Amino acid sequence: MLRIYLTGEVQAERDGKLLSESRLGGPQGRFVLAYLVTERKRAVTQSELAEALWPESLPASWTLALSAIISRLRSDGYTFATVSDLLATSRASATTPSHI
């Protein structure tokens, strides 16, 4: 089971083990994961995600950068096809997650 913790630092846990920040793609990967989880009931366009990720100005190669972030998340098994695969939770402590 995959659990996503959205309060405090965005983290993911798979089968009881926290995934490292590098597996989440760093701060931008964590942001994209959190955004997609919070918007999981609707389709999110690339341009919407890019504007949320880079609100000041889009980098010249934003499509490539966003594709790389998404590809990294997918390579670790984060797919957003089914909502049942994602469970947004609140993190009470490092060892005791409490569910929303």
Image (cartoon, rainbow, N blue to C red):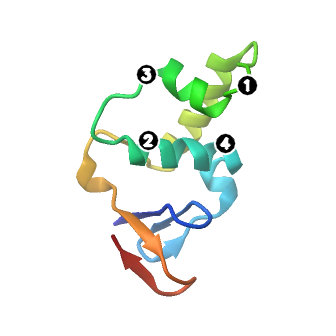
For disc 4, the neighbor class at 10 Å (few under 14, some 14 to 19, many from 20) is some
- How far apart in space, not on screen, are marks 3 and 1 (Cα)? 18 Å
At label 4, the amino acid type is Gln
| Mark 4 lies on residue | 28
The residue lying at 52 percent from left, 65 percent from top is 7
Spatial distance from mark 2 to mark 1, Cα to Cα? 20 Å
- Quick one: 50 or 20, which is closer to the camera? 50
- Would you name the residue on which mark 3 appears? 45
Q: Which of marks 3 and 1 is nearer the N terminus?
A: 3
Assign a secondary structure to mark 1: loop
Examine the rendered structure and indicate whether residue 1 appears above or below residue 48.
below
List x then y, in percent, for residue 38. 40, 47
**Residue 57, how many percent across, how many down?**
73, 20
Query: Could you tell me the amino acid type at mark 1?
Result: Glu
The picture places residue 99, in percent across and down from the top left corner, at 34, 74
Q: Residue 100 carries which label?
A: none
The CA distance from mark 1 to mark 4 is: 15 Å
- Residue 28, image x, y percentages: 66, 42
Please report the residue visible at 62 percent of the width from the left and 54 percent of the height from the top. 23
Q: What element carries label 4?
A: helix
- Between tags 1 and 4, which lies in front? 1
Along the line of sight, the residue nearer the viewer: 68 or 87: 87
Q: Earlier in the sequence, mark 3 or mark 2?
A: 2
State the SS at label 3: loop
Amino acid at pointer 2: Leu
Quadrant placement of the N terminus: bottom left
Task: Return the disc, 2 or 1, that comes first in the chain's sequence.
Answer: 2
Q: Is residue 38 left or right of residue 95?
A: left
| Mark 2 lies on residue | 36
| Residue at the bottom extreme of this rendering | 95
Read off the residue under disc 1. Answer: 56
Is label 2 in contact with label 1 (beta carbons under 8 Å)?
no
